[in-house]
């Protein structure tokens, strides 16, 4: 007997009881749909985190000052002011694995242009920042090392700042006031959008760090808040981390056994941790959904058992006219697998559609991975076989005489 | 007389299977014992008989006599607990379930008392059923099923569902299904059990015609003497043994009886068919 014939018989049998078949189907549809929607959400979150980390670059290291111990009281990280711009220059000079390094000196302050004012995050950095932070200049240009050395009053604006403060005026060449100091706008950055924390990455104004140190602080200091270092490739970051640590210990005159007064953090560690969390999230969501698929499978088994009992006489007739046990088993198994596969197919469509709808309505990114689709589809087939086997076996092992006598 | 035959058969036991003695079916000392828990039911107690190709045999007996068990064994639905059963030279008593299924499929056609057909499935598809399991190509299945339905006078009813057919028509679909795989014999278990006289005679007419024209061996199990006397030979079973095995001198001819039935009664018969059909369906639900 050909598979095609078996399939035809199975579909006819399912058609004879449409309402029952479709309700059974629904169990699988919901199960598969839920698995796909949940895994898509989880994977969407994973993708998002990966993208965000990629946008900073996994070849980037963060160097921050350590904590300071004052009379036994441990201060918070970064409180020490142990990192200076000379340290950064030394890193660029002496660490072979480092491609570029840029100090960060942060500030906030009101900016004024004409009758408009705006309070962006003000970042003091050097001319290498576009390389390290992957900034691109849309208009004008970034400031130069000469500007940094001279602590010049030049400023590069983020798109949000340019739009809100200058409102249509071509920003390049305009004079803006920051905390009452006049700055000349030399460039505008290409927008980067929101960060994964929902922060506007374009609400910034970038100035030479020397300008912040010398002209925008109550006391002129040489310390910096932190630094970002980039390496040629993510593979080099481990090496660069060691080289920087060694160099800084030497420069800060730390003895053997003394704790570091700085931290060098590797972004790929952060990425790995984030990925672990999102993977866990995906597994968690997926396994909850898988339970509903399991319940759907039990529904199939229930219905198939009822169906076998109800059709005992039919089975007897089929056996009398020459159906082998194997053919009867195959017929019932095909019925349950057809149910679960059709349910799986509809579930894949609904689940993907649901994931798409969620991403549209809630703005939560989703990613319908071919893996999730094929795994849950295969799983639904497996459910059909697993939960269909016992009823099919029961049908096949019926005694033809008993079955014919059943009414 | 039955006893001497039986003894002769017992003497044959253990002898090599002798084929080609003209018997399509040969039972030798067949016992069938059912065990349900502690209770043993001895349904057949040493039945020996031989049926030749082309015979029309009726098996009669009261309920509990073992006639259904005998029919199940002759129809390869069941195997003897003891004894031998040769069918066309093959010792069927030793075959596996699947081998028995193949024999039923290719050599035997079944007609049962009622609820013969797969419900909610058209007459044509019901008739196709044995060919599905025989692996006949689909176009040939349809062609042969149509021809079989035509031979029992049901042209135009191919798409009808069992619930749309009268009891007599349902039995005729069952006969069409029984003969569609070109078997060598047809086994009918109370084929007229739920039918009125007219429909019963129609069914018997078809069976007699198949026996005469196509030389099919036909076995019917019945408790109605009128029906049994359509056969050429009558085997009576009682208490699991053959009580009597005799030739019927002048079998009833269903075609003649049908011709003698008045015209209007035929119309009434049809109406009765429907009401009875409805009644039996209500019972089965």
Image (cartoon, coloured by chain):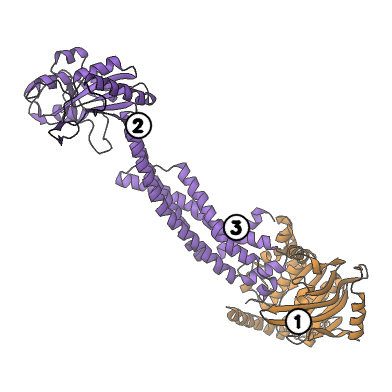
Q: Is residue A84 above or below residue B234?
A: above
**Is residue A48 visible in the rendered structure shown here?**
no
Q: Mark 2 lies on which chain?
A: A
Q: Nearer the viewer, mark 1 or mark 3?
A: 1
Q: Name the residue under label 3.
A: A334
Residue sitting at x 89%, y 85%:
B2
Label 1 with label 3: CB-CB less than 8 Å: no
Which is more N-terminal, label 3 or label 2? 2
Q: Name the residue under label 2.
A: A268
**Is residue A148 visible in the rendered structure shown here?**
yes
Q: Nearer the viewer, mark 1 or mark 2?
A: 2
Q: Give a yes or no on whether discs 1 and 3 share a subunit.
A: no
Can you give x and y, in whole percent of width and height, for residue B117 in the image? Answer: 66, 71
Q: Could you say which is closer to the camera, residue B205 or residue A283? A: A283
Q: Distance between the residues labelled 1 and 2?
A: 82 Å
Can you give x and y, in whole percent of width and height, for residue B245 in the image? Answer: 87, 84
Image quarter hosting the C terminus of chain A: bottom right
Can you give x and y, in whole percent of width and height, for residue B182 in the image? Answer: 80, 65
Residue sitting at x 36%, y 36%:
A272
- When asked about the image quadrant of residue A276, the answer is top left
- Is residue B90 rendered to the left or right of residue A161? right
Q: Which chain carries label 1?
A: B
Q: Give a yes or no on whether discs 1 and 2 share a subunit.
A: no
Crowding at dot 3, Cα within 10 Å, few <14 / some 14-19 / many 20+, comes out as many
Q: Could you say which is closer to the camera, residue A182 or residue B135? A: A182
Q: Mark 1 points at which residue?
A: B43
Q: Is residue A378 above or below residue A79?
A: below
- Is residue B103 rendered to the left or right of residue A106? right
Of the chain colours in the picture, the one used for chain B is: orange
Q: Of helix, strand and loop, which one carries label 2? A: helix
């Amino acid at each position: 007997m050909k598979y095609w014939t078996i399939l035809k018989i199975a579909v006819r049998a399912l058609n004879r009881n449409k309402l029952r078949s479709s309700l059974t189907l629904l169990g699988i549809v919901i199960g598969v749909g839920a698995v796909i929607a949940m895994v898509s959400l989880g994977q969407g979150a994973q993708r998002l985190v990966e993208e965000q980390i990629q946008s900073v670059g996994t070849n980037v290291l963060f160097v921050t000052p350590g904590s300071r111990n004052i009379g036994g009281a441990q201060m918070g990280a970064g409180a020490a002011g142990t990192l200076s711009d000379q340290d950064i220059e030394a890193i660029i000079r002496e660490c072979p694995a480092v491609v570029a390094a840029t100090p960060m000196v942060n500030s906030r302050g009101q900016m004024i242009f004409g009758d408009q004012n705006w309070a962006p995050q003000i970042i003091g950095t050097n001319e290498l920042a576009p390389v390290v932070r992957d900034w691109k200049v849309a208009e004008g240009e970034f400031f130069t090392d000469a500007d940094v050395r001279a602590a010049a009053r030049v400023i590069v604006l983020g798109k949000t700042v340019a739009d809100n403060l200058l409102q249509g005026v071509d920003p390049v060449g305009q004079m803006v006031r920051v905390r009452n100091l006049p700055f000349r706008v030399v460039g505008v950055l290409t927008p980067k959008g929101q960060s994964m924390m929902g922060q506007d990455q374009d609400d910034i104004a970038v100035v030479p760090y020397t300008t912040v140190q010398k002209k925008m602080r109550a006391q002129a200091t040489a310390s910096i808040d932190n630094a970002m270092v980039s390496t040629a490739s993510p593979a080099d970051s481990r090496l660069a981390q060691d080289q920087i640590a060694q160099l800084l210990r030497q420069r800060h005159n730390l003895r053997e056994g003394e704790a570091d007064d700085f931290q060098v953090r590797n972004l790929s560690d952060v990425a790995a941790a984030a990925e672990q969390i999102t993977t866990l999230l995906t597994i968690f969501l997926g396994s909850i959904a898988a339970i509903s698929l399991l319940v759907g499978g039990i529904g199939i088994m229930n219905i198939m058992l009822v169906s076998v009992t109800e059709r005992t006489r039919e089975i007897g007739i089929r056996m009398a006219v020459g159906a082998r046990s194997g053919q009867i088993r195959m017929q019932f198994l095909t019925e349950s697998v057809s149910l679960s596969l059709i349910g799986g197919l509809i579930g894949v469509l609904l689940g993907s559609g649901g994931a798409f709808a969620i991403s549209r309505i809630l703005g939560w990114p989703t990613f319908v991975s071919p893996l999730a689709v094929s795994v849950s589809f295969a799983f639904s087939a497996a459910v059909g076989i697993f939960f269909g086997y016992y009823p099919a076996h029961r049908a096949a092992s019926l005694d033809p005489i008993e079955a014919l006598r059943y009414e | 007389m039955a006893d001497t035959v039986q003894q002769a058969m017992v003497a044959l036991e253990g002898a090599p299977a002798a084929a080609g003695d003209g018997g399509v079916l040969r039972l030798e000392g067949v016992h069938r014992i059912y065990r349900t828990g502690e209770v043993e039911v001895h349904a057949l107690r040493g039945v020996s008989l031989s049926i030749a190709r082309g015979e029309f045999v009726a098996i009669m007996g009261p309920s509990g006599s073992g006639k259904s068990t005998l029919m199940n064994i002759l129809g390869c639905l069941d195997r003897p607990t003891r004894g031998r059963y040769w069918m066309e030279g093959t010792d069927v008593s030793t075959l596996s379930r699947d081998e028995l299924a193949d024999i039923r499929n290719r050599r035997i056609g079944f007609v049962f008392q009622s609820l013969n057909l797969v419900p909610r499935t058209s007459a044509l598809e019901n008739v196709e059923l044995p060919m599905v399991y025989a692996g006949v190509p689909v176009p040939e299945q349809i062609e042969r099923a149509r021809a079989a339905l035509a031979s029992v006078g049901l042209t135009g009813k191919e798409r009808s569902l069992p619930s749309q057919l009268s009891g007599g028509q349902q039995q005729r679909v069952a006969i069409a299904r029984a003969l569609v795989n070109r078997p060598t014999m047809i086994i009918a278990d109370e084929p007229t059990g739920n039918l009125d006289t007219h429909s019963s005679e129609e069914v018997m007419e078809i069976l007699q015609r198949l026996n005469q024209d196509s030389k099919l061996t036909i076995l019917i199990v019945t408790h109605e003497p009128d029906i049994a006397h359509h056969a050429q030979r009558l085997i009576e079973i009682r208490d699991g043994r053959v009580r009597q095995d005799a030739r019927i001198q002048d079998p009833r001819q269903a075609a003649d009886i049908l011709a003698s039935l008045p015209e209007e009664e035929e119309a009434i018969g049809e109406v009765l068919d429907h009401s009875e059909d409805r009644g039996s369906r209500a019972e089965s639900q």
